[in-house]
Image: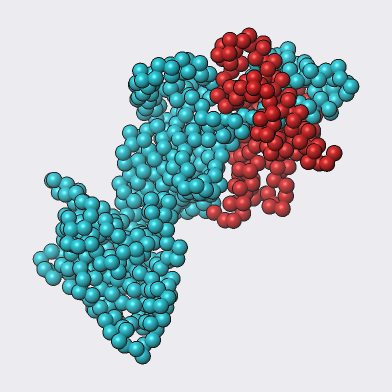
């Protein structure tokens, strides 16, 4: 394998976090998002000779991801949980401003989790670390599911705000 | 409605429903309307998605989904159209094994039952077909999905992108494969892996079912064996270390008419035109070969010979720093080098050595070329049943030391086995011949000697091919050997530079 291929694989693996979030925001189901990401990875690999290493890899990769998402949408046209084309187009256009947020969240997330209240932090851990559904958390904690939703949503909104504040602080704003 | 003209609270709620997979059609339509309203709404949406994905990525731990493997293996969505019977059998075995393990575990840990019952099973996930573990500390890979939570489980259809280091892949059928970076491979099923780029070594000797590797150029069906496949843009290399493989170089265009079998000690390259050519010299990394020692500066850099038959595929394997007790002697036999009554001579230990192929023992016009990267002591280990050939007597000295061969003779009725350690189960002895090589370059060795007992000749000759070992000179030794005007230091050695030998 030549050095360009090695560098290509390095960039590919480094871009997975961003690509997955991008695809997940556009595709209704997580399993489908994972499938799309694998398809995108393969498409990128097959087209690697057209990629110039001086190019922004993510920008190039998002072009493929957008195409793959649209292709899946047309194949799953009966699925009513898809956004319409206009919304997908708008969201794709909006993505570049969110890429930086995602990178910042990578840096500050764990710190922000520590700032959550005990109840919120446990809810987040149950949902993401233990992969429990809201109903399962509700059963385990003997709370109504609606309450668990509220706790989780409050926690995620707190995290979003914390990450945003960290960004502003690091920007000196 | 917030000051930016959209209902932020509702947007948050609906976006989080989407993240949790609970949003319905009406909610989706409402979310669409909200996202259409303003750029700020879309930015908020993306931020919530980013937090969700980041949590999923950062906090995800191993999923507790082992038990339902068999159920998910039967999911139509992921069933493949080949080896269905084998897979059903495998799935049944896995179900039985998993159930047994599960109930044994529950019997010892009653609380586990409660935990298991509460675990969410995502039935749309592809079946878990194996696990991936790092070999060493620097391995880095991704499956291109919500990675960290499943980073040691590989599922049907997963593509592994191995950026750094090496990993071991264990499949449910007990096949074990070592993958070396950089590599891209996709797991089609428990018995089939598609290799797009990179090197994989498969050990299926103890597995319930074999592992077939397919590349753009070939399909390699293993037949209870240890073999490696390396895929690049313009070739696929197959090396058989043990057992046999069936190679179909026309796998991609499905002609399926040119299946050939390759056996232990053979290596073949499939070209873009599907042509087959011999790979003469093979060298495994220390990770793939499971060697503890890592030689930073190899002495033997390549081996070649003058065999030119079109159907001849034997290879020489260079083992850097690998000479030690129980070192495998040949690529096509499982014989081992061992000390006869005491440990093998210490000057050999840790040297680079070449696993020759024993079928070469009767090739009369053979010439083997060694590329030596450093000044070294070069040793030839010659079977004592054969007379020393002229080329050996002319350029090497007999050290007077011997080394033993512990032979594995699978064709005998009692299948004579090999034994670990020196002084046990020694079947043959080889004399150790030495010469000093003062400069890097090419050395040519000749054919094996003829049997002293001329009643046994031909391919069934009861002799072994010679072995080759090279031990690098230390810096001080090189200096001393270079002082040819000081014979006291070199009286027991024959000094020959490579220029004397060409």
Give the image location of residue A159, x and y in percent: 71, 28
Write the residue at 31% across / 77% down: B435
Q: Quadrant of the C terminus of chain B?
A: bottom left
Please report the residue visible at 79 percent of the width from the left and 18 percent of the height from the top.
B9
Q: Is residue B320 above or below residue B116?
A: below
The way the protein has been coloured in the rendering is: by chain
Q: Is residue A92 visible?
A: no
The spot of residue B17 in percent (x, y) is 69, 18
Q: Give the vertical position of B359 relative to B65 (above or below).
A: below
Give x and y (percent) for residue B317: 36, 59
Q: Judge whether residue B7 can be spotted in this image.
A: yes
Residue B100, given in percent of the width and then of the height, sits at 34, 21
State the image quarter where residue B105 is shown: top left
Q: Which residue is more in the foreground, A112 or B370? A: A112
Quadrant where the N terminus of chain B is found in the figure: top right
Looking at the image, residue A19 lies above or below residue B270? above
Q: Give the chain coloured cyan.
A: B
Q: Any idea which chain is the red one in this picture?
A: A
Question: Is residue B465 left or right of A148 when viewed as pictured?
Answer: left
Q: Which of the 4 image quadrants contains residue A105?
A: top right
């Amino acid at each position: 394998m030549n050095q360009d291929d090695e560098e290509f694989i390095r960039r590919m693996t480094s871009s997975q976090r961003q690509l997955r979030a991008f695809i997940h925001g556009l595709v209704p189901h997580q399993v489908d998002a994972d499938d799309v990401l694998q398809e995108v990875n393969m498409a990128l690999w097959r087209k690697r000779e057209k990629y110039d290493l001086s190019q922004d890899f993510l920008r190039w990769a998002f072009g493929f991801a957008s195409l793959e998402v649209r292709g899946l949408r047309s194949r799953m046209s009966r699925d009513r949980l898809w956004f319409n084309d206009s919304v997908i187009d708008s969201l794709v256009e909006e993505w570049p401003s969110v890429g930086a947020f995602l990178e910042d969240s990578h840096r500050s997330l764990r710190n922000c989790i520590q700032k959550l209240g005990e109840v919120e932090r446990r809810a987040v851990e149950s949902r993401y670390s233990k992969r429990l559904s809201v109903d399962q958390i509700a059963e385990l904690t003997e709370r109504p599911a609606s309450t668990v939703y509220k706790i989780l949503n409050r926690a995620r909104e707190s995290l979003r705000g914390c990450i945003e504040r960290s960004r502003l602080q690091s920007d000196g704003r | 409605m917030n000051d930016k003209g959209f209902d932020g609270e509702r947007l948050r709620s609906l976006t989080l429903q989407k993240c949790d997979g609970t949003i319905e059609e009406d909610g989706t339509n409402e979310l669409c309307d909200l996202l259409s309203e303003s750029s700020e709404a879309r930015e908020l949406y993306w931020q919530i998605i980013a937090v969700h994905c980041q949590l999923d990525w950062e906090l995800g731990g191993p999923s507790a989904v082992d038990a339902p493997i068999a159920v998910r293996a039967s999911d139509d969505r992921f069933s493949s159209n080949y080896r269905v019977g084998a897979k059903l059998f495998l799935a049944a075995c896995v179900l039985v094994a998993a159930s047994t393990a599960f109930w044994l575990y529950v019997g010892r840990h009653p609380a586990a039952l409660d935990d298991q019952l509460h675990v969410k099973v995502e039935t749309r996930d592809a079946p878990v077909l194996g696990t991936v573990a790092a070999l060493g500390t620097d391995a880095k890979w991704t499956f291109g999905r919500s990675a960290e939570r499943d980073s040691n489980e590989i599922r049907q259809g997963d593509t592994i992108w191995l950026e750094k280091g090496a990993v071991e892949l264990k499949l449910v059928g007990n096949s074990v494969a070592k993958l070396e970076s950089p590599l891209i491979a996709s797991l089609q099923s428990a018995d089939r892996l598609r290799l797009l780029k990179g090197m994989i070594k498969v050990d299926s000797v103890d597995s319930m079912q074999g592992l077939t590797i397919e590349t753009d150029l070939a399909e390699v069906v293993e037949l209870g064996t240890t073999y490696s496949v390396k895929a690049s843009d313009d070739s696929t290399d197959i090396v058989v270390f043990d057992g046999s493989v069936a190679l179909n170089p026309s796998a991609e265009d499905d002609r399926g008419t040119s299946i050939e079998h390759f056996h232990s000690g053979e290596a073949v390259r499939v070209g873009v035109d599907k042509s087959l050519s011999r790979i003469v010299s093979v060298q495994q990394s220390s990770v793939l070969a499971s060697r503890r020692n890592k030689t930073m500066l190899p002495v033997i850099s390549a081996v070649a010979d003058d065999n030119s038959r079109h159907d001849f595929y034997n290879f020489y394997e260079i083992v850097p720093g690998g000479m030690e007790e129980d070192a495998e002697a040949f690529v096509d036999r499982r014989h081992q080098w061992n000390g006869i009554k005491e440990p093998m001579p210490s000057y050999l230990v840790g040297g680079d050595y070449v696993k020759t192929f024993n079928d070469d023992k009767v090739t009369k016009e053979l010439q083997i070329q060694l590329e030596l990267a450093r000044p070294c002591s070069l040793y030839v280990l010659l079977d004592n049943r054969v007379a020393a050939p002229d080329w050996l007597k002319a350029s090497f000295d007999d050290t007077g030391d011997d080394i033993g061969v512990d032979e594995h003779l699978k064709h005998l009725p009692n299948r004579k086995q090999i034994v670990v350690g020196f002084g046990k189960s020694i079947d043959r002895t080889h004399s150790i011949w030495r010469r000093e090589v003062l400069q890097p370059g090419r050395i040519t060795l000749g054919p094996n000697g003829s049997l002293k007992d001329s009643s046994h000749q031909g391919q069934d000759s009861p002799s072994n091919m010679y072995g080759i070992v090279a031990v690098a000179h230390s810096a001080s030794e090189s200096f001393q050997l270079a002082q040819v005007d000081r014979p006291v230091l070199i009286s027991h050695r024959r000094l020959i530079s490579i220029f004397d030998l060409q």
